[in-house]
Image: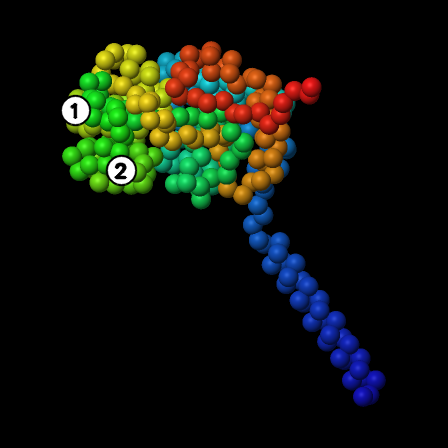
Amino acid sequence: MKIGQTLLVVILSVAAAYATTTYVTSHTNNQPTHESTFARVMQTKTIRCGYVIYPPQFMKDSASGQMSGILYDLTELLGQKLRLKIEWTQETSWGTAAQDLDSNRFDMICSGFWVNSLQASAYGYTKPLFYQVMWPIVRGDDTRFDKDIQTMNDPAIRITGMDGDIPIQIHDEQFPKAQMNTLQNFTDYNQLMMEIASNKADVTFLDGDFAMRYMKANPGKLKLLTNHGPTRVYANPWAIKRGELDFAEYLNAAIDEIVYSDEVEPILKKYGAYPEGYYLANKPYHPYQ
């Protein structure tokens, strides 16, 4: 090959390599970059909280805007442990919380969350702060299920729950022969108990604390069926965007301190939590002898 031809080949090769590099670099730089929640929190020193109103977990005074509740206190304690500001950014709902997380409207759901199989694909979770217990709720004078809870699995029995909520899962898995009366998913949970008390339905399933508060205000109307054990027990962590493992690990360090230092139970007692509604997390250690 002549020198001129060789030089031309070299020039063309260099030009092609430069063009390819320029294209790849330009193409890569135009791709949207994803900032992790952990990176953003480290930069801003702030956790942006979404929340759902659900007493006594989370409450908000309609006049003053003052917030309170078990998870409000625990979240503020989390901020103290991590030396971070807690920003109560936005109220959300169970129906929109996953979408709001994915849209980066906030960093985590700070009013508590039940880990359950129905929503396992939509959320990531921290370690649990405690556990919540679900029981069957029936009318105060109804004795049909006292000896055998499986008598609920009958076409004559009316179970009520909200669309997409856990009572429907319990019906489908344990009592599929019973009727299922579904309310819209933005219904107040008190309405479920009113359905039972007014004989529009026979059974629903709710956490023991929420039910006990209703029964205290309406004595004799309803009762918990506790003699068969709880229907479900759910871990209650903070919910975050799925896949944010570094953020979860960061939060878990503070959760271990909170749980192992017995800082959860005093907050439960502060808000008059009923034992029927809560189980404490077990500690993975024992005293050295």
68 on left or right of 77: left
**Quadrant of the image occupied by residue 233:** top left
* Circle 2/circle 1 CB separation < 8 Å: no
Q: What residue type is labelled 2?
A: Phe
Seen from the viewer's position, the closer of residues 276 and 39 is 276
SS at circle 2: loop
**Quadrant of the image occupied by residue 82:** top right
The residue under the point 32% across, 36% down is 170
Disc 2 crowd, CA 10 A, few/some/many (<14, 14-19, 20+): many
Query: Percent from the top left, x then y, of residue 157?
Result: 19, 33
Residue beneath label 2, please? 175
SS at circle 1: loop
Q: Is residue 184 visible?
A: no
Task: Name the quarter where the C terminus is drawn.
Answer: top right
Query: Percent from the top left, x then y, of residue 158?
Result: 20, 32
Seen from the viewer's position, the closer of residues 35 and 198 is 198
In front: label 2 or label 1: 2
**Quadrant of the image occupied by residue 30:** bottom right
The residue under the point 49% across, 22% down is 280
Query: Percent from the top left, x then y, of residue 242?
Result: 50, 41
Task: Relative to 16, say whether 59 is above or below.
Answer: above
Number of the label disc, if any, that sits on residue 199: 1
The residue sitting at the right extreme is 3
Q: Which amino acid does label 1 sit on?
A: Asn
* Snapshot colouring: rainbow
Task: Name the quarter where the N terminus is drawn.
Answer: bottom right
Query: Percent from the top left, x then y, of residue 254?
Result: 61, 26
Task: Relative to 47, say whether 17 is above or below.
Answer: below
